[in-house]
Image: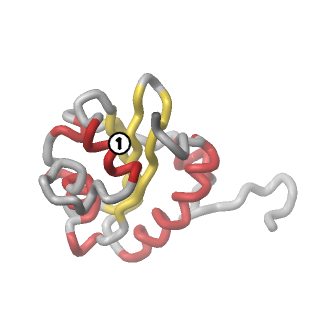
Amino acid sequence: MPKAGKPKLIGGKTLQQWDTEWVRVNGGFRILHPELNHSVGLFRAVRDGQVMVLGQATECANGGLRKRLSDFRRSSWSGRNHTAGWYIYTNRDVLKLEVLVTGSDREAAKVAAALKRPMIALHEPPKTFG
């Protein structure tokens, strides 16, 4: 447990510092994003200012965020076999996409994985959609 007054660091930054680094991605979930190839980090789907889904992409050598986000556009079930994936797929035209890139290597993937739970706790996306 961190000492009082000393915030826990994840990848050298506090959760609050990481939270200021989200970037809106033009085209959202509707288009491919080759600019995110091999980048790892978190993504979130935002609707009417509320974070609806928060996920991660940690496979930097296998396409990273570009590949993970493309899962929500394809005709296959790879990105939609869970409720959150189906929600993104069916609402891809109205959801805003924001990413938090942690880097493009194994260490960055560890940071992304460590950030996911605290970011979910911070933004409290709904557990169900309806």
Image position, residue 120 (x, y; %):
57, 50
Q: Residue at x 62, y 44 (%)?
A: 122
Image position, residue 126 (x, y; %):
54, 40
Residue type at mark 1: give it. Answer: Tyr
Image position, residue 56 (x, y; %):
40, 59
Instruction: Quickly name the residue at label 1.
Output: 87
**Is residue 44 rendered to the left or right of residue 11?**
left
Residue 124 or residue 97, whichever sits in front = 124
Residue found at the very far top of the displayed protein? 48
Residue 13 or residue 43, whichever sits in front = 43
**Is residue 19 rendered to the left or right of residue 25?**
right
Q: Residue at x 41, y 44 (%)?
A: 44
Position of residue 46 relative to residue 4, above or below, is: above
Position of residue 4 relative to residue 32, above or below, is: below
Colour logic: secondary structure
Query: How many numbered discs, if any?
Result: 1
Image position, residue 118 (x, y; %):
61, 55
Q: Residue at x 29, y 54 (%)?
A: 80
Residue 40 or residue 129, whichever sits in front = 129
- Quadrant for the N terminus in the image: bottom right
Position of residue 20 relative to residue 36, above or below, is: above
Q: Residue at x 28, y 70 (%)?
A: 60
